[in-house]
Amino acid sequence: MADVIKIAVAGALGRMGQVVQATLADDPGFRLVGGFDRPGAAGEGVVPADQAIAASDVVVDFTIAAASAELAPKVAAAGKALVIGSTGFDDAQLAVIREAAREIPIVRAGNFSLGLNMLMGLVARAARALPAEAWDIEVVEAHHRRKVDAPSGAALMLGAAAADGRGADLAKVGRRSRDGITGERPVGEIGFSAIRGGGVVGEHSVIFAAEDEILTLSHSARDRSLFARGALAAARWVAGRPPGEYDMQDVLGMKDG
């Protein structure tokens, strides 16, 4: 790979797309070769998707799940690397991305924050140490009014970390919502609550609740640029990697050893 990594930005007119472009403009290790958005979209610096992908080393994608699933095969066909920050995928969309990762390296993460990814390790450790019979786990997240999926990708990452710490399957112990007469809480359940409003960038808390004490582990995002910096760190790491699906734990070296 060349010393300067050429970046194409998907969702260039979106909030995160604009932040990524502004952030990489300040880093001499990157060069923006084109931003693109939905077909027919127009804006300063916006070019056709095929043109931007062809000129790039890495495509950075902060769009929505459906758009990311549509984009992944196109990037794979061009032989480029891909960083995905979209969330809210269903099983079929994940299968499309998994298939693309057989041909190119893809970093997909529900959150690109260093602090949030460190929190995952703390949550797993706490879940491993605090028995399910005595400690209930709840994941609470808050985001701006424009976020379209819930729970957030980061909340699901934290729930998965808690489940892994207890040797459980989140698909079996996770509880996405409660309404009406829900009955007594099952032992080992991991609950999720989502708040949407205003311009909240991102707040995540994992609550461990016993009868006589409560432990809360939390992370607050103050500026979207931290996600852009994390995504660009992922772009730098993934450039030239072998095909496969990676996450921020790989990028940060937290799986080594």
Image (cartoon, rainbow, N blue to C red):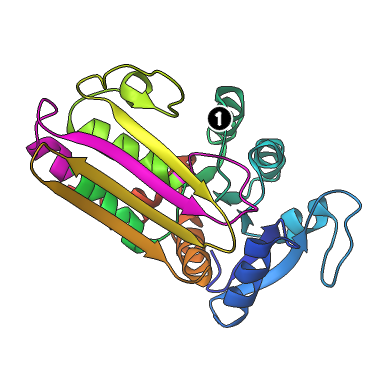
Amino acid type of the residue that numbered disc 1 sits on in the rendered structure: Leu
Query: In this view of the protein, can residue 127 be seen by the observer?
Result: yes
Which x, y percent locates residue 5? Answer: 58, 68
Q: Which residue is mark 1?
A: 94
Which x, y percent locates residue 247? Answer: 41, 46
Q: Residue at x 62, y 62 (%)?
A: 16
Q: Residue at x 58, y 46 (%)?
A: 86
In this rendering, the answer to whether 233 lies above or below 131 is: below
- Residue 164 within the segment the image draws in magenta: no
Q: Quick check: 2 left or right of 79?
A: left
Q: Residue at x 83, y 65 (%)?
A: 46
Residue closest to the eye, 90 or 107 = 90
Which x, y percent locates residue 135? Answer: 14, 34
Residue closest to the eye, 84 or 30 = 84
Q: Quadrant of residue 125?
A: top left
Q: Quick check: 62 left or right of 29?
A: right
Query: In this view of the protein, can residue 255 be seen by the observer?
Result: no
- Residue 140 within the segment the image draws in magenta: yes
- Range drawn in magenta: 125-153
Q: Residue at x 14, y 28 (%)?
A: 132
